[in-house]
Image: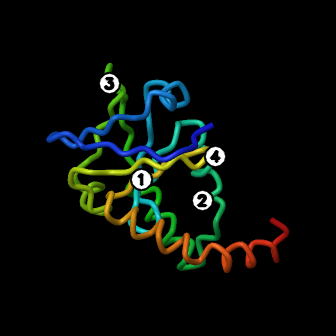
């Protein structure tokens, strides 16, 4: 289970330390791709395969489906965890998420998200301010 919030620094080569408590879930490999809200999604291989299968089932005739598939699949990158538990984040993905030095890793059960620290703080603050409204909308869905 991947949960929690962790603050790290990217090194000068664009490598990011995966929290020690998450490494067993990733084994030797992580799949990194563009996420939503300009963060990165990082999946263990088995979770990535589930997501990719769902994306491939989206109707090709719908522009939104094609756009989402391109966002998630075309930008995906396989990264090996090194002996220190780091993954290399390619330059194009670092640019997409505006990652420079300080980042936040957010565990979301089956994946992690990687955020620029300043963006994460702003996003979290906004979400906290809207928590009641969000909770009410989710209760309508039975959550």
Relative to 130, say whether 120 is above or below. above
Q: Which of the two discs, 3 and 2, labels the residue nearer the N terminus?
A: 2
Quadrant containing the N terminus in the rendered view: top right
Please name the residue that numbered disc 4 is placed on: 50
* Of the pair 87 and 120, the residue shown nearer to us: 120
Q: Is residue 49 left or right of residue 93?
A: right
Please name the residue that numbered disc 2 is placed on: 55
Relative to 43, say whether 115 is above or below. below
* Of the pair 143 and 7, the residue shown nearer to us: 7
* Of the pair 36 and 69, the residue shown nearer to us: 36
The crowding category of the residue bearing disc 3, from other C-alpha atoms within 10 Å (few below 14, some 14 to 19, many at least 20), is: few
**Which disc, if any, is residue 33?**
1
Marks 4 and 1 sit apart, C-alpha to C-alpha, by 14 Å
Q: Position of residue 138 (x, y in %)?
A: 75, 72
Q: Is label 4 in a helix, a strand or a loop?
A: helix
Marks 4 and 2 sit apart, C-alpha to C-alpha, by 9 Å
Q: Nearer the viewer, mark 3 or mark 2?
A: 3
Marks 3 and 4 sit apart, C-alpha to C-alpha, by 25 Å
Please name the residue that numbered disc 3 is placed on: 82
Marks 1 and 3 sit apart, C-alpha to C-alpha, by 19 Å
Badge 3 vs badge 4, beta-carbon distance below 8 Å: no
The crowding category of the residue bearing disc 1, from other C-alpha atoms within 10 Å (few below 14, some 14 to 19, many at least 20), is: many
Q: Which of the two discs, 1 and 3, labels the residue nearer the N terminus?
A: 1
Q: Which of the two discs, 2 and 1, labels the residue nearer the N terminus?
A: 1
Q: Nearer the viewer, mark 2 or mark 1?
A: 1
Q: Is residue 131 left or right of residue 121?
A: right
């Amino acid at each position: 289970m991947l949960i929690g919030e962790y603050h790290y620094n990217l090194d000068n080569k664009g490598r990011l330390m995966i929290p020690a408590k998450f490494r067993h879930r990733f084994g030797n490999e992580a799949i990194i791709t563009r996420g939503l809200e300009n963060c990165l999604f990082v999946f263990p291989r088995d979770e990535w395969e589930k997501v990719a299968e769902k994306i491939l089932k989206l109707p090709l005739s719908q522009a939104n489906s094609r756009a989402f598939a391109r966002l998630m699949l075309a930008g995906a990158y396989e990264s090996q965890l090194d002996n220190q538990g780091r993954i290399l984040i390619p330059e194009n993905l670092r640019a997409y998420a505006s990652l420079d030095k300080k980042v936040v890793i957010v565990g979301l059960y089956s994946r992690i998200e990687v955020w620029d620290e300043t963006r994460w703080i702003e996003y979290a603050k906004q979400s906290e301010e809207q928590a009641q409204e969000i909770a009410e909308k989710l209760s309508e869905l039975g959550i």
